[in-house]
Image (cartoon, grey):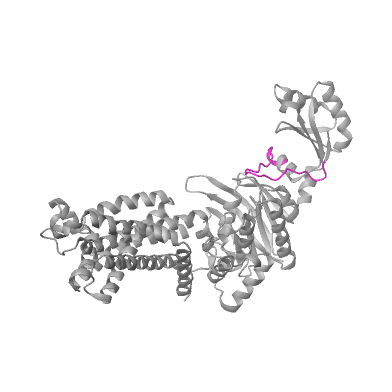
Amino acid sequence: MGDIISVSDLVLVYADGTKAVNGISFSVSEGEFFGFLGPNGAGKSTTIKVLTTLLRKTSGTVQIAGYSIDHQQPEIRKLIGVEAQESVVDPDLTGRENMTLQGNLQQMKGEELKERVDELLKLVELEQVADKQAGRYSGGMKKRLQLASSLVHKPKLLFLDEPTTGLDPQSRAGIWKYLEKLNRQEGITIFLTTQYLEEADKLCGRLAIIDFGSIVASGSPAELKRQVGADTISLSLEGGGAGGEAAKAKRILSGVEGVAEVFDSDGGLTAHAKDASRLIAKVVRALDEGGVRLSSLNVSTPSLDDVFLQHTGRRIRVEELGRMPDRRFGGRRFR
Amino acid sequence: MTLFFDTQYLFVRALKKVIRNPILLFFSLFQPVLFLTLFTQLFKNLGSLPGFPSGSYIAFVTPGILLQNGFTSALQSGTSMVDELNSGFLQNMLVTQVNRSAILLGRLLSDAFRVCVQSVIILVMAYLLGAQMVTGLAGVVVILITIASFGLAWSGISLSIGLATRRAETVTAIGFFLTFPLLFMSTALFPQAFLPSWMQVVSSLNPVSYNVNAIRDLALGGITWSTILSAYGVTTLLAIVTLGATLYQFRKVVS
């Protein structure tokens, strides 16, 4: 199948001189579930705004379903659905009215629109509250309404800008369920941005890791993790590593045979090593002999966070309240 | 055709918002009602001064209050545009196939409609307080058209400032900065002859005066086409400038 999104050397510089997107190239095939994973301010939303005709690019080429983003915006708008990061439901209108208005603006009306609205309200499980004003919906319900609205004109390609940011785990799981269904059963191509590792890992068939406006790595989650090639040992130090303890621990850990790179992390250290679980005894003994006191030690197979760390030297920080627990897959905890 | 339908959808949406926020409508009428009741009581005796065109101050000042309400109402247009710009609602519309002009047109028409509803309420109150309408229903219709078009021209100011600055505070500040001086230095509250001579010069150039005079003629005198047409001429000129600026700023946002 052909590429539904094709981007090459895309650059976007804002009027104030901020270079938000720094020459990225990628393509997405029809039917794919593709994601942009990166921290706040990495250029994810800016890229979506360019791809959805909201912002004019500074340079580069962008084609959506073969249409040029510079000259064929109306054709593109017909094909795409967009769910913005901000909540854009009208609080004074009911859920049904919000969707009907969206359908009207997408040039739909009458019985056809009415049926489509009912069908989508059922899909996102809002039919019970469809006639209540959307201002009284919870955050998760608003997001579901927004998702349903973006689907009203049956788009072939759906853009989702951080669709679950700020939601509780239960609402998040609900949204994931709909998205998987849309992609698998209805064949809608989905382009999603997220700062959640778990979301990218679970949903995306392929993803690009983006940082400071550049793509630093891309591939399927499994491929990316395989490229890290090593397990991760994360340890936290008693007292958070204050008073030179962290530096000392780093020195000792680097000296253990089989340990590759060692990075500083919040209140402790992260190290990469092949077959890390077999090194644990050695690591603990070395640190103990050196007088370093540990508060926890965790060995895990590579996660997308490790992929990000490997390419940028930093961990992804989720900047918001009520952040998701930073769960590692396949982690075994030693205390 | 999409322009017509899309404008209609957005007009209806705006109306629903007004109806579902009766408190907002009430508070936006608070100021004119205050003027109508307290202000007119305060200056009640002015009406009997020699040189006042009508015996009652309330009848004299009602056109000024209508205009003042038109000002305030037009300010809201800009601030709610800023809201939609900053909340992302506007951007959400822009990724759909909606006709771009309909976004602006739907808003302007609903603004005009809102100011007409408010004006009818003010006219009814003024009537109950003793102000007469010599030209009857036909006069009321012409008055509403006059205020609605003046309001549209004025919406252009708040909309263009809102689109350019994206700050509601700026819209409100500049709005008030313009509103009161223009209102005081016009024939809205006092006859031209009562103003100091330098203010008379300002007043005779002030678009507010032209519109107040037209409305006042309709309410107290009769239909004088020359006054009405000169009011419309001034409003049209104002509208070309302000709505032109709005269109320019809107295009910058849309493209």
Q: Quadrant of the N terminus of chain A?
A: bottom right
Residue B246 point in image, percent of width and height: 38, 60
Q: Residue furthest bottom?
A: A111
**Rendered residue at 30%/67% (across/down):** B123
Q: Position of residue A112 (x, y in %)?
A: 61, 77
* Left or right of A127 on screen, residue B229: left
Q: Nearer the viewer, residue B140 or A39?
A: B140
Q: Is residue A329 magenta?
A: yes
**Which region shows up in magenta?**
A310-331
Give the image quarter of residue A118: bottom right
Quadrant that contains the C terminus of chain A: top right
Q: Main secondary structure of the magenta part?
A: loop
* Residue A91 visible, this orientation: yes
The answer to whether residue B159 is seen in the rendering is no
What residue is drawn where x is 87% and y is 29%?
A282
Left or right of residue B178: residue A95: right
Q: Quadrant of residue A179?
A: bottom right
Image height of A253 relative to B121, above or below: above
Q: Position of A274 compared to A62: left or right?
A: right
Which of these two is toward me, B2 or B32? B32
